[in-house]
Amino acid sequence: MSIDTSKRTNEVEIMDDFDLQGKELDKTLRDLDNINKWLGGNKITLEGVKNIVRDQPKTNQIHIADVGCGNGAVLREIAKWGREEGYNFKLTGIDANTYATVIGSQMSANFKEIEFLALDIFSEAYNAFKCDITLCTLTLHHFKNQEIIDLLKLFNKQSSLGVVINDLQRSRIAYRLFQAFCAVFINNEIARKDGLISILRGFKKDELKNFAEEIPKTRHQINWKWAFRYQWIIQKEKI
């Protein structure tokens, strides 16, 4: 079967169903976490956080929000690093799936700096939300182009220090390699199917650059990372 990566697919992922719950949701989130660990994906987000906070006094509290947080795996990695380095982090996981935030709270019981909110990011409640850094790991590709532009503008407005995007490169090679990876390592139909759709909903670098042009008075770093990811750091221009 030939793979068309000329434009983003509109195909819907199973995980887009915010009513997905129970053991099926828990297992899928854990399998997706394992995929990210094996392929080094969460480190890309952590590197972005390090880039932004390195000039911040460690005595100041830094509020970091992870949009589309799932079970909070990225936040737990950041919490561990923050503790090691002596940062004062407040970490908020935000997800539209209430069941995911419950799982995240249970898995983060030993991390007092982490909280979870069940919020639709298109709601008035989220619109009023403020933080220092917004994270968006493997979440941006779930939205259509105009929604992405609107969300990026909102993230930038809400975040005093910056925004870190970690998302997929749309690539035939990435698609085929993920198929091979799943055949050997992943026995989860949702993770396999959604993973392939995610790649086809991913981005080309020029598309990210076009999005960046829609966000005024900001500085952008867009870097390709293994495995077929883009790390995009957005910060306000220094006056």
Image: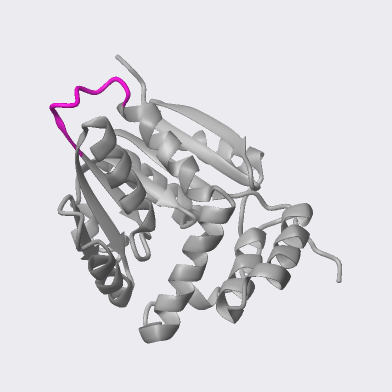
Magenta stretch: give its range: 54-62
Residue pictured at 32% horizontal, 46% vertical: 154
Circle count? 0
Q: Position of residue 138 (x, y in %)?
A: 49, 55
Task: In the rendered view, tell whether residue 92 sits above or below residue 206.
Answer: below
Q: Position of residue 125 (x, y in %)?
A: 19, 60
Q: Position of residue 198 (x, y in %)?
A: 60, 63
Task: In the rendered view, tell whether residue 238 sits above or below residue 27.
Answer: above
Q: Main secondary structure of the magenta part?
A: loop
> Which image quarter holds the N terminus?
bottom right
In the foreground, 99 or 81: 81
Name of the residue lying farthest toward the right: 1
Residue pictured at 29% horizontal, 20% vertical: 55
Q: Is residue 119 visible?
A: no
Name of the residue lying farthest toward the top: 239
Task: In the rendered view, tell whether residue 98 sits above or below residue 55.
Answer: below
